[in-house]
Image (spheres, coloured by chain):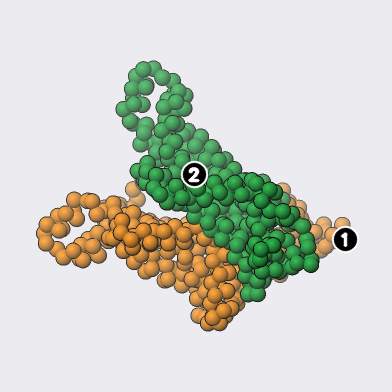
Chain colours: A orange, B green
């Protein structure tokens, strides 16, 4: 965690462009500039600035935006539910679709269906979200006029961006499901189950699937990171008022506390989710012991 | 190699050939503004139409392809080189060096990749070198991790023991015995990563952090023209199609290499 704050701090401080100048404008009087520097604390040396920053972080304070003078933490809290809504909807679309596609292509290995699904999922990995997003927008809202093209609001606004966001996730999930299941199909316990006369469907859906869960759950956790990545692009396109668009605006305005707050917040969320995934491994598969050094 | 892999190689060669030969293939200057012919739909004269400043989209795609492909290839080679050396050291030396290196790798991997790349690419003035550096700075970590894992399994192999018994030095074992073993793994990863880096490059240029106007890249063409999506969809459609096709070919190539080498890669 400390490493993350240090790395982001170095990145942010290395940024070109003086934030003070962009607040007061190029022609401000030197005294005014000096005064604002003192207020922002950028006149102190870097180490003290960093320690001050970490001190604030511990108190749950991300500093204030240079522009609006609002606390970044408040803005993040305000925008986070929107991004979460988007990510969760995308997950709700991606998980069942990805799983079903992966299962079908694993059990129908080397048939036409399998090839079709596999090529669709490679395509899903290769299409940039900002392009598929624009095409989806063009088709559904500008041609068919079913959904509004952009904005923040109720479920109608939510569907297109989350559909866009779910495409790469569907692709990765179905690929991982396919490879994992195919690996498990050759294991001896599957033969045992068959020999015991358990119904084929029950073997496929319960015995095999349960053993395939660990990689699948890992991918779902990692996909959350791709939702956060994709959110920057998708939210910019669809004008969805979440953390992604907030980050982009911060970058354009050189609003360092905002960018820093967004990157840290997203990373912390990502790390926590993966930690959570590690913990639930134990419940999915009791063979995985907690507190065991994985290396 | 499977047919799909062969087809992808053919398409990739074609795309590279067209990009390299751009001045011979298209007679239009990609950055020449011609206000008499703005927003023209695809026709015989401009096969993919023109944009809002009358620039020929086909030319811009050809010249943009040069940048997108060069950036992705350079970034892949750089991150592969760095990742290979660091992964070899970590896996071979083990102990404290390994722990230190791997904690740093984990630190890099714990960031959502695009966000970190965005963070890095705003430190430096925007341009293609910045994009290469940003992608490499994030990308080497996954190479290093996979190489390290592979070296750990190889280190105990019999042929290494034999080399040691013959009195080979550590350096010789590392570079003459272990490194060549990584070649198939590196080839497969290169194919898979290139597809991803084409997308990252496009995303960064889409966000305005890549090559600056008037120079065209596939990503920046989409972001510049996205306001015209409803009325002049071809301005956005073709550059995106190129990104998708190129990335798709690299991914398919990586997949079919993976199948033919019978490798299992995770991470």
Q: Which residue is nearer to you in this view: A179 or B165?
A: A179
Q: Does the CB distance between marks 2 and 1 fall below 8 Å?
A: no
Residue A89 place in picture, x, y as percent: 46, 72
- Residue B212 location, quadrant: bottom right
Mark 2 burial class by Cα count in 10 Å: few <14, some 14-19, many 20+: many
Q: Is residue A114 visible?
A: yes
Q: Is residue B195 left or right of residue B52?
A: left
* Mark 1 Cα-neighbour bin, 10 Å: few <14, some 14–19, many ≥20: few
> Residue at 74% of width from left, 54% of height from top?
B29
Q: Is residue A84 above or below residue A42?
A: below
Q: Is residue A292 left or right of residue B223?
A: left
Q: Position of residue A92 (x, y in %)?
A: 42, 71
Q: Which mark is residue B221?
A: none
Splitting the image into 4 quarters, where does residue A143 fall?
A: bottom right
The vertical placement of B213 against A142, above or below, is above
Tell me the chain of label 2. B
* Residue B157, quarter of picture: top left
Q: Is residue A54 visible?
A: no
Please determine whether, in this image, residue A79 is positioned above or below residue A61. below
Label 1 secondary element: loop
Residue carrying label 2: B190
x and y percentages locating residue B155 in the rendered image: 37, 31
What is the quadrant of the N terminus of chain B in the image? Answer: top left
Q: Chain of mark 1?
A: A
Closest to the observer, A242 or B175: B175
Residue under disc 2 on the same chain as residue under disc 1:
no
Question: Up-down: is A87 above or below A123?
Answer: below
Where in the figure is residue A99, as x and y percent of width and height? 35, 64
Q: Residue at x 15, y 58 (%)?
A: A193
Q: Residue at x 46, y 69 (%)?
A: A90
> What residue sits right under mark 1 in the picture?
A27
Q: Secondary structure at mark 2?
A: helix
């Amino acid at each position: 965690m400390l490493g993350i704050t240090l790395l982001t701090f170095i990145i942010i401080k290395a940024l070109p462009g003086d934030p003070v100048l962009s607040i007061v404008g190029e022609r401000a009087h030197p005294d005014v500039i000096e005064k604002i520097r003192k207020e922002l604390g950028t006149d102190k040396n870097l180490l003290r600035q960093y320690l001050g920053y970490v001190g604030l972080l511990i108190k749950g304070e991300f500093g204030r935006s240079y522009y609006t003078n609002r606390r970044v933490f408040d803005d993040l809290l305000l925008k986070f539910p929107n991004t979460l809504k988007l990510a969760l909807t995308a997950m709700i679309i991606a998980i069942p679709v990805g799983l079903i596609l992966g299962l079908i292509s694993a059990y129908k290995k080397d048939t036409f269906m399998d090839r079709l699904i596999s090529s669709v999922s490679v395509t899903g990995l290769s299409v940039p979200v900002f392009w598929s997003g624009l095409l989806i927008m063009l088709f559904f809202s500008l041609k068919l006029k079913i959904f509004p093209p952009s904005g923040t609001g109720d479920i109608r606004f939510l569907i297109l961006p989350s559909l866009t966001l779910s495409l790469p996730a569907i692709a990765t999930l179905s690929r991982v499901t396919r490879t994992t299941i195919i690996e498990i199909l050759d294991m001896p316990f599957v033969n045992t189950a068959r020999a015991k006369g358990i119904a084929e469907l029950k073997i496929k859906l319960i015995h095999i699937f349960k053993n395939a869960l660990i990689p699948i759950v890992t991918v779902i956790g990692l996909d959350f990171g791709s939702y956060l990545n994709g959110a920057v692009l998708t939210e910019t396109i669809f004008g969805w008022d979440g953390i992604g668009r907030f980050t982009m605006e911060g970058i354009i305005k050189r609003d360092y506390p905002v960018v820093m707050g967004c990157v840290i917040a997203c990373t912390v969320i990502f790390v926590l989710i993966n930690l959570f995934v590690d913990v639930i491994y134990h419940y999915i598969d009791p063979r995985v012991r907690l507190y065991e050094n994985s290396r | 190699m499977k047919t799909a892999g062969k087809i992808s190689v053919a398409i990739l060669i074609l795309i590279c050939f067209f990009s390299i030969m751009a001045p011979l293939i298209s007679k239009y200057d990609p950055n020449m503004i011609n206000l008499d012919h703005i927003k023209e739909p695809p026709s015989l004269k401009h096969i993919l139409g023109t944009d809002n400043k009358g620039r020929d989209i086909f030319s811009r795609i050809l010249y943009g392809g040069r940048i997108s492909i060069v950036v992705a290839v350079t970034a892949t080679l750089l991150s592969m080189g760095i990742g290979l050396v660091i992964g070899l050291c970590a896996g071979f030396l083990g102990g404290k060096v390994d722990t230190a290196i791997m904690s740093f790798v984990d630190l890099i991997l714990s960031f959502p990749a695009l966000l970190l790349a965005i963070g890095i690419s705003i430190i430096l003035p925007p341009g293609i070198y910045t994009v290469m550096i940003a992608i490499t700075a994030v990308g080497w970590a996954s190479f290093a991790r996979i190489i390290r894992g592979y070296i750990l399994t190889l280190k105990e192999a019999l042929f290494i023991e034999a080399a040691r018994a013959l009195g080979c030095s550590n350096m010789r074992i590392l570079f003459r015995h272990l490194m060549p073993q990584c070649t198939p793994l590196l080839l497969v990863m290169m194919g898979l990563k290139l597809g991803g880096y084409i997308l990252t490059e496009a995303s960064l240029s889409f966000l305005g952090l890549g090559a600056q106007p008037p120079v065209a890249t596939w990503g920046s063409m989409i972001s510049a023209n996205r306001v015209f999506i409803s009325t002049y969809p071809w301005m956005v459609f073709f550059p995106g199609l190129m990104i998708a096709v190129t990335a798709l070919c690299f991914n398919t190539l990586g997949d079919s290499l993976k199948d033919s080498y019978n490798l299992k890669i995770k991470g």
